[in-house]
Image (cartoon, rainbow, N blue to C red):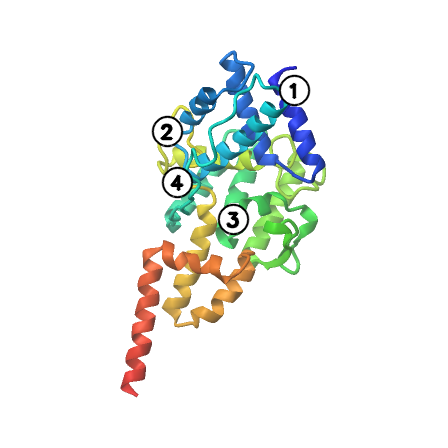
Amino acid sequence: MTLRTELDRYLHLRRMFGAKLKSDELRLRSFVTFMDQAGKTFVTRELIVEWMNGLRHASSGTKASRFSEVRQFALWLRGMDDRHEDPPPRGFVPSHVTRPAPYIYSDAEIAAIIRAARDLPSIFGMRGLTCAILYGLVAVTGLRIAEALALDTADFDVERQMLHIRNGKNGKERILPIDPDVAVRLAQYCIERDRLLERRSEPLFVNCKGERPNYCWARANFVRVCQSIGLRGTWTRPLTGSSPRIHDLRHTFAVRTIIKWYREGNDAAREMHKLTTYLGHEGPRDTYWYLQAVPELLELASARVSSGLASEESQ
């Protein structure tokens, strides 16, 4: 039995117990491809270490999660056939994950990203059309890219200017009000999309085949766009986990919203709960993280506190 067949069995068994494994499957198939290219049939510690060495540009969190996935698969293989070796022990790759500081895009950078996205090569023009609107929507709403890709056309209410987020993180749903201009642009996209497809599309966003794009498609095109405008270096193999990332568009939206509160003198503590709901965060703690991650926010918050104390002392 080939290693690829063993992987299919392993994934099937885990899915029987309710696991989705979309990302896990991609990473494990990458490992099996590495084994095939090395001409190896049985997993050894040395091969796992060699595969991990190929992730040297990845973040510590990415390395830890991928090691954990391969280690679990290797343990299962070992239980089925003792010709496979025990993997390195838990903790071989440090599991402590530090959340990277967000990259905050300027207005000019976001505009350049959208312009460059429109120019992405495509036979019928669908790739550029979709990417420009997709990245623009994430930038002005703070949607997670997965939430945007999961939207159906029926989730967009152009008259009420709302999006129905049905597939939020942790299965949470929410209604997202959008700016009237954003609603108009989305409606125009739907008209042009259906004209190119010659039919009405169920998914809101589609790729060149008329199908719902996946995260890898959106991320890979984003890397190409950023490389084309000089925001990322040009490597033979794009480092998709490197900054700036597509998710940083969401971070930029959140940070700019909070900065606006402070500059306009709004009650940030009260507004933070609204933003937590709008972004679909589990709780305010996730939203308050931006105060620690972005120096400008800390400075504005400190200035607000100092101003408040000075006002109290003068009374």
- Given contact means CB atoms under 8 Å apart, are the residues at marks 1 and 4 in contact? no
How many marks the image carries: the answer is 4
**Separation of residues labelled 3 and 1 (CA atoms):** 39 Å
The residue that appears at 51% across and 41% down in the rendered structure is 132
Residue 107: x and y in percent read 39, 51
Residue to which mark 3 is pinned: 138
The quarter of the image holding the N terminus is top right
Q: CA distance from mark 1 to mark 2?
A: 36 Å
Name above or below for residue 133 compared with residue 179.
above
Residue 201: where, in percent of width, then height? 69, 40
For residue 302, which quarter of the picture?
bottom left
Name the front one of labels 1 and 4.
1
Residue at mark 2 = 234
The numbered disc on residue 5 is 1
Mark 4 belongs to which amino acid? Ser
What residue would you read off at disc 4?
243
Q: Amino acid at mark 3?
A: Val
Do tag 3 and tag 2 residues touch (Cβ < 8 Å)? no
User: Which of the two discs, 3 and 4, sits closer to the camera?
Assistant: 4
Reading the chain from its start, which is encountered first: label 1 or label 2?
Answer: 1
Quadrant showing the C terminus: bottom left
Q: Nearer the viewer, mark 4 or mark 2?
A: 4
